[in-house]
Image: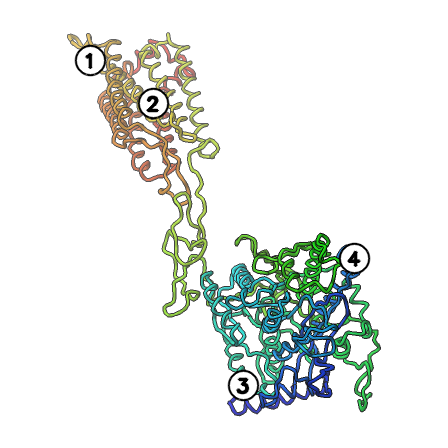
Amino acid sequence: MGIYVGQGHFVIRIMLVVVLLLVLLCHSVCKTHSINCSIYDDPLPIPHEFYQPGDLIIGGIVSQVIFLYDDLLFTEQPAQILINEPICNAFYSSVPKNYQQILALAFAVKEINENPKILPNISLGFHILNSYYTARMTYKATLNLFSAQHRFVPNFKGHNNKNLIALIGGSISEISANVAIVSAIQKTPQLTYGSFLPPQGSKMQFPFLYQMVPNEVHQQMGVVKLLQHFKWTWIGLLAVDDDRGDRFLQTVVPMLSQNGICYDFIVRLPKWNYVDELIELLIQQWQSYAMVIQRKANVFFVYGEPPSFQVVRTLLFLAPFLAWPPLGKVWVITSHWDFASLSVQKIWDIQTFHGSISLTVHSNQPLGFQRFIQMIRPAWAKGDGFIQDFWEQTFSCSLKMSKGLDEKKNKTCTGEEKLDSISGVLFEMKMTGHSYNVYNAVYAVAHALHAIYKYSSKNIRMIKGDRLAVQDVQPWLVHHFLRSIIFNNSAGDSVCFDENGELVVGFDVTNWVVFPNGSITRVKVGRLEPQAPPDKMLTINDDQIVWHQSFNQVLPLSVCNDYCYPGYSRKKKEGQKFCCYDCALCPEGMVSGQKDMDACVNCPEDQYHNKDQTQCIPKVLSYLSYKDELGIVLAILNISFSFITITILQTFMKHKDTPIVRANNWTLTYTLLISLLLCFLCSLLFIGKPGKVACFLRQIIFGMVFTVALSTILAKTITVVLAFMATKPGSKTRKWVGKGLTNSIVLSCTFIQTNICTIWLSIYPPFPDVDMHSLKWEIILECNEGSATMFYCVLSYLGFLAIVTFIVAFLARKLPDSFNEAKFITFSMLVFCSVWLSFVPTYLSTKGKYMVAVEIFSILSSSAGLLACIFFPKCYIIVLRPELNSRERIMQRKV
């Protein structure tokens, strides 16, 4: 790249480019001014002025023309630089856009003079002088305003003195401060319409100063909010190289750090230097340009006033000639820059600033202003000394051919050229922020004068006839009333000052769109309200913003290093700023921080992290519901088996007098069938959202009804054995056979289980509980058994009964069929024990609703096994083979 050429070759290239620039400057639209130098009468102390007489005069200091070369400014003898020395020879160029500020002042005065409701019978006039962006000319212009018309005699009060009652100006801090020094001495209120950075104790030093733009701190805080809005944490800082730039950096660097933003680099912008220093300036800045190109920051926060903007424009214009690469960045600027070009720069490319974002002074469109502008012609006002240069340098023509001027090289202006055909970088038809401030400043002075007029109507000493004694109005009196004025202008905006003399107003967030033909348009994309709460201070419509072409209309990224991937956290890099970091993978079970990624965090108990470990997702509630497919299937099985049990019970009751029913002890049979029915029904307590009553009852009822069922089967088995033994001759067991034995067996076995359950309920009763840790994605709603020991005691007792019953039935399996059903009981108990032996490990290995489903399935399968093995063979004979249901057939069956 051309940036890295040798130093000697680079200097030669710089010199050639500067020669080219000088040729362009001096050959194009620059004007030469030469007058007869006289330091006494000073008939034309400043080449550009605009005077309109009136009873009361408002002074104006503007910067519509800027020197490119001045004999006195380049003299090496300081003694010749006198405050009353006129300009002998100068090359200068206009800033066409600033001419609108002059028109805004003239338009406001015209409106006020035509409005009978404000200052009736009193005419306002104005006297506008140019500052040329130099301190010497600013002082001279200000003192000229306090002198008699056409005589430069400051400090002398004569009969032909102008009745100056207020000053409006200037457009930048240095001009405003220079004017303020003089206005403070003269006790004249000054309304500065451009930026102003007040020094410490400025209120005491400049008590008559009013600012139409709020304090710069508000703008700086607004830019910080804007950077946070777009998540730009790595930016470049460009600040003018003077005391104001130093104060800016001292204020904004800590402010950025406190809000999580770092600066990549700091570049100091030179102040506007004159042509003879341009070579040295370029040599000093080429290394900064190379650094800016190579750095990662895509956003520049710029602090500098219009003269610094002209320096930046010059550097960017010369960049292609020096083989510098283009600069595709986002420029974030405050209200200082209005992208106003000199007339010599109107053909310079400004695409570098396409997509810039600025906090511009709030502006609105007063009624009739655009119509007023469209009526402007070169001869619209006799006292306008700015219009000729503005017209000629804007339209590149000549209004009046001078002697010796080559007419072939300069076209003549018709005077009918259209202002709306000019590019926005030179002139805007809509009122800009600075012009709007000038307009409001004139009205503020007018309303203060009107307040004096109303007050004086009650004071005889200030009345002469029916009108205000104009000569009695002193500037300090205007200052007294100006502090408390409040009004709504014709655009509908409220105008008032706070206790610091600053206008209470917000800023427009403006997006600058530069078209390929060089025209420029400002688009309002948001609003900054310094008086609003911090979270509502800035509002931006992102969809309306147009970015620089280098970003392909995608939100620019300006960070120290790329964002961490999902599931990673930021880890600070040693020895670097806090905005720079490494990315570390989050440990298992943790996610990236939600507000920032400085650390990995655990999700709350009721949430779990997603696959990428980027966010926490609420866990779903899990329990066996009647809406689940599994819950529906189990409920249908419960009801089906219950109906089957009821059907069998009805069948036995219907055929209770048949031999097969009488032979099986119908009391025990009914008890067993009812207990099995309750076993099926109790499983319904396990389905549904766990409640306090359901949790309290379900395991207890399950244990009790199964105990009754098993104890009944045990009683049936023991009865069969004792009945067989009682048939032997001389047996003493006959006295044990009967209902008393069976009832005692059932009651005693049930009594033991009742005691176990009573102890369980009295000490550690079950209760509803929430399990948030067993499953990653679910919150388990369950019944906590209270005491696992007591729960397993219930199961153990049931297992004991089942084993005893199985053993007794197994020993009695070969007894004659005519007396017992031991074979069926043996097989049923084998099924029962198999189910519950497999239940324990399965139950312990499952979680949530599936654990509940395992228990329900065990209840259903074991109960169904008992029902099928014991009662299905009898139902088969009763229903399908009734011929076998007779005493003879039963007695004939073999062992």
Q: Where in the figure is residue 893, as x and y percent of width and height?
A: 30, 15
Q: Element type at marker 2?
A: helix
| Mark positioned earlier in the residue sequence (3 or 2) | 3
In the rendered image, is residue 330 in sight?
yes
Residue identified by numbered label 4: 465
Q: Residue furthest front?
A: 461
Amino acid tagged 4: Gly
From the viewer's side, name the closer residue of 797 and 368.
368
Residue 283: assigned label: 3
| Mark positioned earlier in the residue sequence (2 or 4) | 4
| Spatial CA span between label 1 and label 4 | 147 Å
**Picture quarter containing residue 389?**
bottom right
Residue identified by numbered label 2: 701
Amino acid tagged 1: Met
Q: Is residue 790 above or below residue 406?
A: above
Q: Element type at marker 1?
A: helix
Q: Where in the figure is residue 392, as x and y percent of width and height?
A: 77, 79
